[in-house]
Image: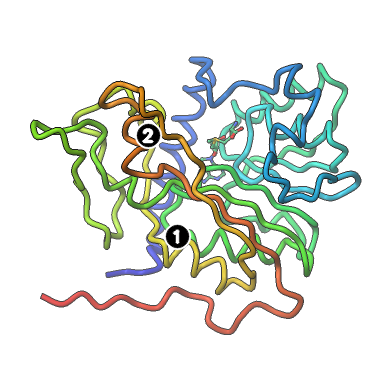
């Protein structure tokens, strides 16, 4: 098995598909592409960081919104006083940032690029990197963490959210025995197949036409550590709804947490010597 998934044709096909996917979602005015509302802008950090991982103040901080286009994150962090840069693969998502910035008198720097190649950004150029759910869109998440660690200053914060690996394995609807089923192998270096039996949960769990990769816990949690960061907190945001009907997002979340959220801090010294996930040997 190729652990680094350093497969250039696969990477480039995924990037193209995922850019198209988000360009289409913008055209369809999907919820993921909704800019910040007036109510959210009245309390930007309360909206973005209810747990308080950012310590309640980002004024003057150089902050990278990684894979976070769409006019929501850039507007809210700018309104909170941060000096914001957005990196996103989708020109349409970045156009939303541009429009919101113009309307609100904000001035984020907008860069069209993939989260795993940030050559245009200098080492140590951010105090904070925020990274909403999107690591599933690249085959090699290690490369993303390396880039994040490189662009952070020592002591800088990295807040990321990821699709949980088990959620990517599990069906979107209950079977005849009323169980959600594990459908996809955990140890894999190919993308997760398209959903065969969609349910009302699907629109919250998979984006239409996107190419998505399952990153194992050791690749996410271990990968962040091996890139020269220390994990300070870890949560699984709660989406359980016991009153929701079968096959809905809230019902499925009773059994499988859809997301992981991680707070990490860049260590003071250079990145750890072991910077790749140890190889898994599959027998049989
Ligand atoms: C779930 S959305 C996050 C932004 C959303 N507006 C929010 O507020 O949370 C995921 C974003 O990842 C971006 N994306 C997908 N693949 C990417 C890649 N390889 N590099 C950078 N951005 C990527 C998409 O264009 C999309 O804007």
180 to the left or right of 144: left
The residue furthest front is 242
Colouring convention used in this rendered image of the protein: rainbow
Give the residue drawn at x 72%, y 58%.
157
- SS at mark 2? loop
Residue 267 image offset from top left, x and y in percent: 71, 73
Instruction: Categorize mark 2 by other alpha carbons within 10 Å: few (<14), some (14-19), many (20+).
Output: some
Residue 276 image offset from top left, x and y in percent: 48, 75
Q: Quadrant of the N terminus?
A: bottom left
- Sequence-wise, the earlier of marks 2 and 1 is 1
- SS at mark 1? loop
Residue 72 image offset from top left, x and y in percent: 68, 28
Of badges 2 and 1, nearer the viewer stands 2
Residue 143 image offset from top left, x and y in percent: 53, 63
Q: Write down the quadrant of residue 175 in the picture.
A: top left
Query: Residue 206, labelled with which disc?
Result: 2
Residue underneath mark 1: 140
Give the residue drawn at x 44%, y 30%.
21
Instruction: Categorize mark 1 by other alpha carbons within 10 Å: few (<14), some (14-19), many (20+).
Output: many
Q: Write down the quadrant of residue 4 in the picture.
A: bottom left
């Amino acid at each position: 098995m190729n652990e680094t998934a350093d497969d250039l044709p696969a990477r480039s096909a995924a990037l193209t598909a995922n850019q198209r996917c988000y360009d289409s979602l913008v055209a369809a005015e999907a919820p993921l592409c909704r800019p910040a509302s007036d109510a959210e802008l009245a309390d930007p950090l309360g909206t973005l960081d209810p747990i308080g991982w950012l310590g309640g103040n980002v004024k003057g901080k150089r902050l990278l919104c990684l894979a976070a286009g769409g006019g929501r994150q850039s507007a809210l962090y700018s309104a909170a006083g941060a000096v914001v840069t957005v990196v996103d693969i989708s020109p349409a998502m970045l156009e939303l940032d541009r429009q919101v910035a113009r309307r609100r008198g904000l001035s984020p720097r907008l860069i069209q690029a993939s989260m795993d190649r940030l050559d245009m950004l200098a080492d140590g150029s951010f105090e904070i990197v925020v990274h909403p759910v999107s690591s599933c869109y690249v085959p090699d998440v290690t490369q993303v963490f390396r880039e994040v660690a490189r662009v952070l200053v020592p002591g800088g914060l990295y807040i990321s959210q990821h699709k949980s690996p088990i959620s990517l394995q599990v069906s979107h609807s209950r079977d005849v025995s009323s169980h959600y089923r594990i459908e996809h192998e955990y140890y894999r270096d190919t993308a997760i197949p398209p959903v065969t039996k969609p349910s009302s949960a699907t629109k919250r769990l998979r984006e239409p036409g996107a190419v998505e990769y399952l990153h194992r816990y050791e690749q996410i949690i271990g990968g962040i550590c091996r890139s020269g960061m220390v994990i300070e907190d870890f949560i699984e945001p709660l989406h359980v709804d016991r009153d929701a009907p079968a096959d809905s997002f809230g019902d499925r979340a009773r059994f499988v947490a859809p997301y992981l959220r991680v707070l990490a801090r860049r260590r003071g010294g250079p990145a750890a010597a072991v910077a790749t996930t140890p190889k898994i040997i599959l027998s049989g």
